[in-house]
Amino acid sequence: PAVVLSYRRDYPEGTPEVLLVQDLLAQLVEQDQSPLNTGNLHAGKLRLLPHCSETVLGQVAQEGWRKVFAACGLAVEIPATGCCGMAGTWGHEHENRKASLEIFARSWNTAVSGTDDPVAATGFSCRCQTEKATGQTLRHPVTILRGLIEGSADPSEERTTRAA
């Protein structure tokens, strides 16, 4: 998300429109051109944690994910979160690790726990931070979608935790 939003800001004119993946997929769903429009529905919910750059866009960035997962029969819950605390490579640096985990604890720790629903996160650093802080491996929403399309995964089985 951060790269796409940077392209939009830095190259506003004279370049092709750059879409967030959820915007592209939502357009395909609306045009009935999506592989998600298979009728293979999975009733349930998904908790989705957007990258902080998407969060600042508010409902605009989140609505695409809602449309895409609704095509699969999944309701999307997007809890209020701030930054995961990773901030790119900043949270990987030893001297920043304590502060990074304190930032994670402010909203992300609660958001990744306290639910039996599958949890997905759009940001790479957010997924790394969650695994480092909790041992829980989050999937990108596209990974969950791929499993649904291929029929190889039930989203409720997408939650994994590595051994301590």
Image (spheres, rainbow, N blue to C red):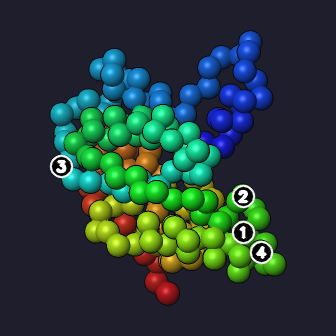
Which amino acid does the dot numbered 4 rest on?
Answer: Asn
Q: CA distance from mark 4 to mark 3?
A: 41 Å
Q: Which mark is residue 43?
A: 3
**Left or right of residue 5, residue 28 in this image:** left
Q: CA distance from mark 4 to mark 2?
A: 12 Å
Measuring 33% from the left and 61% from the top, which residue is drawn there? Answer: 118
Front residue (pair 103, 70): 103
**Left or right of residue 38, residue 25 in this image:** right
Q: Residue furthest bottom?
A: 164
Q: Which mark is residue 91?
A: 1
Q: Earlier in the sequence, mark 4 or mark 1?
A: 1
Task: Judge whether 151 appears above or below 114 on screen.
Answer: above
Q: Which mark is residue 96?
A: 4
Q: Do callouts 1 and 3 mark residues in contact (Cβ within 8 Å)?
A: no
Q: Earlier in the sequence, mark 4 or mark 2?
A: 2
Q: CA distance from mark 4 to mark 1?
A: 6 Å
Q: Which residue is identified by label 2? A: 88
| Mark 3 residue element | loop
Q: Earlier in the sequence, mark 1 or mark 3?
A: 3
Measuring 18% from the left and 34% from the top, which residue is drawn there? Answer: 39
Which amino acid does the dot numbered 2 rest on?
Answer: Gly
